[in-house]
Amino acid sequence: TAGQKGFGAEKSKNDVHEKQTAPVEIQNSKQNAHHSSQKQPFHIPLALGLLAADGDTLPLKLTGCTAEKNQDTIILELRKQSETFVFENIPAAPVPSLLRGFSAPVKLLFDYSIADLAFLLANDTDEFNRWEAGQQLMIRISLEQIQRFQNHEPFNLPSELENAFR
């Protein structure tokens, strides 16, 4: 859509969580054709939270930042094409809750699994992200079921969907 900004975020898949840190890499995508003359990346305020495996929000401490302690949401200021933010004292690999409160009018490109989306739907304290996770989860499941139907396979709803509504 013209005028919308986009970025992608990636969870680190390596074992840095053993050191109790969680890096989050965020990238500004290339500008769309409408903004192609603009050379600078957009400034994007990205509200982010991290959820533990038990569904609790984790207190966030950003490396090199002296912000208030025990915040469960932090606003990252993305000003470059690509930036990595490192959170400290994260006991295990968290599920990120991105764009909390719809903090910026951007297209989010993040490869959440069906299990992650169901987890966010069931546990995220941010109402926008719970709604968005539910929308994305149902779209993915619907597309999978359509594919199964076209392949003459029986329907098979993932158990994560049922668990998200318990």
Image: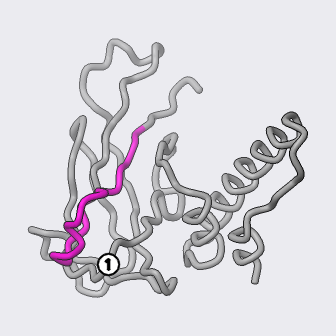
Q: Observer-nearest residue: 85 or 42?
A: 85
Locate residue 71, reporting x and y percent: 33, 81
The quarter in which the N terminus is drawn is top right
Is the residue 71 above or below the residue 11 in the image?
below
Count all numbered tags in the image, as a single digit.
1
Q: Which residues are magenta?
A: 7-23
Residue indicated by mark 1:
92
Residue situated in front as seen by the camera: 159 or 46? 159
Q: Is residue 76 magenta?
A: no
Percent across and percent down for residue 35 are 41, 18
Helix, strand or loop for disc 1 = loop
- On-image quarter of the C terminus: bottom right
**Quadrant in the picture for residue 115:** bottom right
**From the viewer's perspective, is 70 left or right of 150?**
left
Give x and y (percent) for residue 57. 43, 82
The residue shown at (71%, 55%) is 135
Amino acid at dot 1 = Ala
